[in-house]
Amino acid sequence: MPTNILLFSSKGVRVQLGLKILFAIALSMGWYAINGEDSAQLSLLIFLFMLALLLLKPISFQSPERREDYIQQLKHNYERRIDLKKKEKAEKKRLSQAVTERDYKKEREKTKRVDHKFF
């Protein structure tokens, strides 16, 4: 799969990006044309600054419903993790108790066998 398809899914995005770059170039070239060769470094800085401003996405408004859904999802995931930890802890406790009981039964059987051998 070509990488340009992965980076830009539609032609509209590519066109917008191209127009933003062209606008930044035009603005810096205009500055360079007005002020002459002495302003080459400043023209480059204007280009980079404008390009950064145009390419950064502004902070968008997030609806309260979407925020509440996100918070509920976080709570649900947290509760699920807590439940899994509790189940894991209970399973470990049950396994250790089963091992302890098995060891206790083995010891009892050994002592019973020993007692029967001597009589």
Image: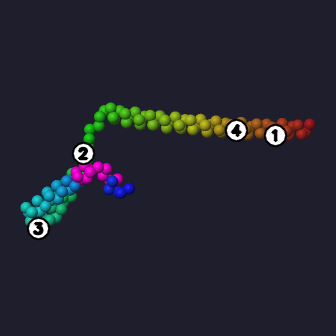
In the rendered image of this protein, does residue 38 appear above or below residue 64? Answer: below
Q: Mark 4 — residue?
A: 100
Q: Mark 1 — residue?
A: 110
Q: Which residues are magenta?
A: 6-17
> Mark 2 and mark 4 in contact (Cβ < 8 Å)?
no
- The residue carrying pointer 1 sits among few (fewer than 14), some (14 to 19) or many (20 or more) residues within 10 Å by Cα, namely few
Mark closest to the chain's N terminus, 4 or 1: 4
Q: Mark 2 — residue?
A: 58
The amino acid sitting under disc 2 is Pro
Mark closest to the chain's N terminus, 2 or 3: 3
Mark closest to the chain's N terminus, 1 or 2: 2
- The residue carrying pointer 2 sits among few (fewer than 14), some (14 to 19) or many (20 or more) residues within 10 Å by Cα, namely few
Tell me the element at label 1: helix
Which quadrant holds residue 107?
Answer: top right
Mark closest to the chain's N terminus, 3 or 1: 3
Residue drawn at 88 percent across, 37 percent down: 116
Q: Mark 3 — residue?
A: 37
Residue depth check, mark 3 versus mark 1: number of the one nearer the observer: 3
The amino acid sitting under disc 1 is Lys
Residue drawn at 85 percent across, 39 percent down: 113
Per the picture, the main secondary structure of the magenta-coloured stretch is helix
Quadrant position of the N terminus in the picture? bottom left
Quadrant position of the C terminus in the picture? top right
